[in-house]
Image (spheres, helix red, strand yellow):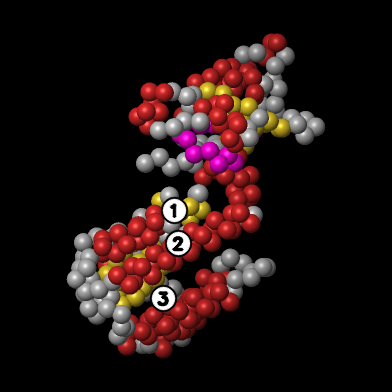
Amino acid sequence: PYRHDSYFYYLTGFTEPEAVLVLVAQAGGAERSILFCRPKHEEREIWDGFRYGPEGAQAAFGFDEAHSVEEIDAVLPSLLANHAVVAYPLAANTRTDMQVRRWLETVRMQGRAGVTAPSTAIDIRTILDEMRLFKDAGEIATMRRAAEISAQAHVRAMRASREGLREYHLEAELLYEFRRHGAQSVAYNSIVATGPNACVLHYRAGPAELRDGDLCLIDAGCEIDCYASDITRTFPVSGRFSPEQKAIYELVLKAQAAAFAEIAPGKHWNHAHEATVRVMTAGLVELGLLDGDVQALIDSEAYRAFYMH
């Protein structure tokens, strides 16, 4: 399945493959947005689905110009001419690097006519990364929707859980709930792990049977319009924790609460993690799973046998 590039989608909202966006910044503030995309093609659309084509894309998405991607080699050099800087995804893939090199060489060949080529190349992702850190109201609403759907999916899987089912049965419940509410895909491969499988950090949902007395860990989330959610929960297969399971669960819950208390403007991003380490290490000592001074155990990272992250 095709999944469009997140940076490209952030700038365009356009989801068709084989598309290129060019943004031209002129002195004095004049700017142009130019899309190159697949042309209309009746036979290919019968087989592969609708295409906007340049005219349709320009009308629907508001680009200043749109051209067939088949014309890109003819048009791009003229857009680069007499600009000092070109920004693109540096070293993202060999094909793009070779294309940009070819276009720049075409511009340089016009040097005797007074045409100049960009002398500086920067990675556009460094600019976009900073922009994407700050979410507007629409983005936050999409993120909340993704999280809500994922939470509903976890609840559905918990309700379905019972002895005798297999991990892939609960994965199916997750996928059904994601798609039923309009999520385009999973945000990552769902982890559904019962019994000892839950100790494998990147386990995939498999055929292991759910058994009474075991725990089941689900790490799963959906994606909507390139915005992902990510939820992990662990629950008893048959609905009741053993005393030992409850003690560990409540320790993790306490660590989570300590992390939340450290999340605020002005705090460093790692303060939340450091809070979980303190709570987890002290709790493991209290439960008898670690022995020694709490700070010394933190300094030696003794907790990592239980808390690999």
* Residue 184 screen position, x and y as percent: 43, 50
Q: Seen from this angle, which residue lies furthest top?
A: 112
Camera-side mark, 2 or 3: 2
* Residue 182 screen position, x and y as percent: 44, 53
- The residue at 36%/73% (across/down) is 234
Query: In this view of the protein, which residue sits in the foreground, 186 or 155?
Result: 155
Left or right: 248 as drawn, with respect to 146? left
Left or right: 243 as drawn, with respect to 261? left
As measured in the structure, the alpha-carbon distance from the residue carrying label 1 to the one carrying label 3 is 40 Å
**Element at badge 3?**
helix
Q: Which amino acid lies under the numbered mark 1 shown in the image of this protein?
A: Gly
Give the magenta part as a residue range. 11-23
Pointer 3 residue: 303
The mark found on residue 149 in the picture is 2
Tag 2 and tag 3, C-beta contact below 8 Å: no
Q: Earlier in the sequence, mark 2 or mark 3?
A: 2
Q: Which amino acid lies under the numbered mark 3 shown in the image of this protein?
A: Tyr
Please indicate, yes or no, whether residue 210 appears anywhere in the rendered image.
yes
* Residue 257 screen position, x and y as percent: 52, 78
Quadrant including the C terminus: bottom left
Quadrant including the N terminus: top left
- Which quadrant of the view contains residue 208? bottom left
The mark found on residue 55 in the picture is none
Relative to 230, residue 272 above or below = below
- Which quadrant of the view contains residue 221? bottom left
Pointer 1 residue: 182
Please say whether residue 90 is one of the residues in the magenta stretch.
Answer: no
Tag 2 and tag 1, C-beta contact below 8 Å: yes
